[in-house]
Image (cartoon, grey):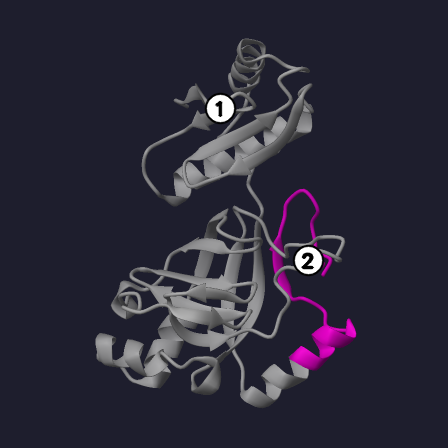
């Protein structure tokens, strides 16, 4: 395993594992994040996974840069990236496509030369790896979208997108967890609360897990929304975790 460690300001460093976006590099970054988190290194406050790097935030008065680099280097030299099996956890995200929830679905259909039903089938027909979170709390950078439905961003971004909006921008798809301006082609909306600061787990998912979009009718969308607001909705997971066996859902 090759990597390099670089400074980021006076209270962070980054461990660079590669220079391209692919599932294998993401897997190694995830293993490193979990492995180092378990070591509870003095002074470290947070690990942030990105496409090909792991950023380490720390308190410089508790751990100096050179000291921390030496410790991380020593730990990573002992990390096993081949042994064992990484669990695969997939959260099911219901989406009502088209209509008022997805005003740009016709644009995507026209650009792709596909029917409404086929665009929905291709968009919901794969499990998307969460490479990283960023931009706003709970915003996911996903990999794996069918290239046949790739569509350019809007020329004129909207001033307001409703929370839960599911969109396409070039060859990426994603979800807006909060009300926000944005230039993505909005093809649907989920009734789930992807980010809730009052919840024990504010963000439903994390980097290295997967998202599967599940088409629902407007009637189902409204029912789920009522359950979410009442606190009775059970978030659905397909859980494949060799360390925990079984498949209980993550707390929602």
- Of discs 2 and 1, which sits in the foreground? 1
In this rendered view, identify the residue nearer to me: 246 or 121. Answer: 121
Label 2 secondary element: loop
Q: Is residue 107 visible?
A: yes
Q: Are marks 2 and 1 in contact (CB under 8 Å)?
A: no
- The Cα atoms of the two marked residues, 2 and 1, are separated by 41 Å
Asked whether residue 249 is drawn in magenta, I would say yes
Asked whether residue 157 is drawn in magenta, I would say no
Does residue 115 sit above or below 9 in this rendering? Answer: below
* Residue underneath mark 1: 9
Does residue 184 sit above or below 200 in this rendering? Answer: below
- The quarter of the rendered structure image containing the N terminus is top left
- The quarter of the rendered structure image containing the C terminus is bottom right
Does residue 99 sit above or below 7 in this rendering? Answer: below
* Residue for point 43% across, 69% down: 159
Characterize the local packing of mark 2: few (<14), some (14-19) or many (20 or more) Cα atoms within 10 angstroms.
few
Q: Which residue appears farthest toward the front when viewing the image?
A: 159
Stretch of the chain drawn in magenta: 225-252
* Residue for point 36% across, 61% down: 145
Q: Name the disc covering residue 247, or none.
A: 2
- The number of numbered discs placed on residues in the rendered structure image is 2
């Amino acid at each position: 395993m090759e990597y390099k460690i670089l400074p980021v300001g006076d209270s962070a460093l980054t461990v660079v594992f590669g220079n391209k976006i692919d599932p294998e590099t993401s897997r190694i970054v995830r293993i490193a994040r979990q492995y180092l988190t378990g070591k509870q290194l003095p002074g470290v406050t947070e690990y942030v996974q990105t496409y090909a790097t792991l950023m380490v935030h720390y308190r410089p008065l508790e751990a100096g840069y050179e000291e921390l680099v030496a410790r991380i280097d020593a730990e990573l030299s002992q990390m096993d990236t081949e042994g064992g099996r990484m669990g695969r956890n997939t959260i099911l995200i219901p989406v009502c496509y088209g209509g008022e929830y997805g005003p740009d679905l016709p644009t995507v259909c026209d650009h792709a030369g596909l029917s409404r039903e086929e665009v929905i089938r291709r968009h919901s027909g794969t499990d998307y790896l969460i490479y990283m979170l960023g931009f706003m709390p709970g915003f996911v950078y996903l990999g794996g979208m069918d290239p046949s439905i790739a569509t350019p961003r809007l020329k004129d971004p909207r001033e307001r997108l409703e929370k839960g909006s599911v969109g396409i921008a070039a060859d990426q798809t994603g979800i807006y967890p909060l009300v926000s301006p944005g230039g993505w082609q909005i093809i649907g909306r989920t009734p789930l609360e992807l980010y809730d600061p009052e919840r024990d787990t504010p963000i439903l998912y994390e980097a290295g897990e997967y998202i599967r979009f599940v088409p629902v009718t407007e009637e189902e969308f409204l029912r789920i929304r009522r359950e979410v607001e009442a606190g009775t909705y059970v978030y659905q997971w397909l859980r494949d975790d060799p360390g925990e066996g079984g498949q209980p859902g993550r707390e929602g």
